[in-house]
Amino acid sequence: MVMRSQEEVARHFWEEFQRRGGTYSTTAYVRKGRRGESVATATYGKGETGYRTIHDDDTYVVMGKTGIYCQTAKEFQDNYLYENPMQPRNDEIMGKGFAVYRSRRQIQALEVTAEDMKFFGEGGNGEAQFMAPWGSPTLVEENDILATTFPLDDAKPEVYRIELSVFKQTYEQRQA
């Protein structure tokens, strides 16, 4: 199986983001991480990448009911409107230290096609991997979402994957 680098993926999809991508933003459930706590980024039980909390100020961000990843306190402050958190309405999240935050960021997103999977070198099981911007291999499947920061940053292109059901639960399209 081919492991595409982050640079290859960004170069290959950059014009596609501009041509067929849409602009989206989100909210997220966030709580403070605990020193030594570890989490495997996963969506519906499929491992994507791994991450280990090292500092007390690390923050875990839950995207939808089924996806989770980590950000440092600085990344959290840079990416979310942290001044006015909202109380979660999700029964599974209430009482676990989470609050709802609106994202400062917007993304450009496009759905992975069968043709796109050929680029990734899909190995016969419908799955492939590529190197994520944070340096770990990440899973990609047809109909997943490829995302990048919007407005597009030609000086620092990066592409990451969001599982389709998580994307639909957590992102809203912005009007042009």
Image (spheres, helix red, strand yellow):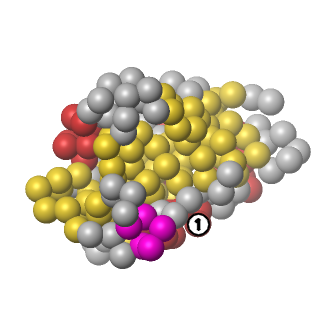
Q: Nearer the viewer, residue 87 or 103?
A: 87
Residue 153 can be seen in this image = no
- Expressed as whole percent of the image width and height from the top left, the position of residue 45 reads 68, 51
Q: Is residue 17 left or right of residue 3?
A: left
* Residue 109 is one of the magenta-drawn residues: no
Query: Image quadrant for the N terminus?
Result: top right
Residue 5: where, in percent of width, then height?
A: 58, 26
From the viewer's perspective, is residue 118 above or below residue 7? below
Q: Seen from this angle, which residue lies furthest left? A: 83
Q: Foreground residue, 111 or 77?
A: 77
Name the residue at 52% across, 38% down.
Answer: 39
Q: Residue at x 50, y 33 (%)?
A: 38
Q: Quadrant of the C terminus?
A: bottom left
Residue 92 magenta: yes
Is 63 left or right of 89, judged from the image as shown? right
> Identity of the amino acid at label 1?
Ser
Main secondary structure found in the magenta portion: loop
Vertical arrangement, residue 60 with respect to residue 101, above or below: above
Residue at left 46%, top 33%?
37
**Residue with the most extreme right position:** 124
Relative depth, front residue between 125 and 83: 83
Circle 1 SS class: helix
- For label 1, the residue is 165
Would residue 164 be seen by someone viewing this image from the given angle?
A: yes
**Image location (x, y in percent) of residue 98:** 34, 57
- Locate residue 13, reporting x and y percent: 52, 44
Left or right side of 53 for 30:
left
Q: Is residue 103 left or right of residue 138?
A: left
- The residue range painted magenta reads 90-94
Q: Residues within 10 Å of mark 1 (few under 14, many from 20)?
A: some
Identify the residue at image location x=22%, y=34%. 74
Q: Is residue 113 above or below residue 156?
A: below
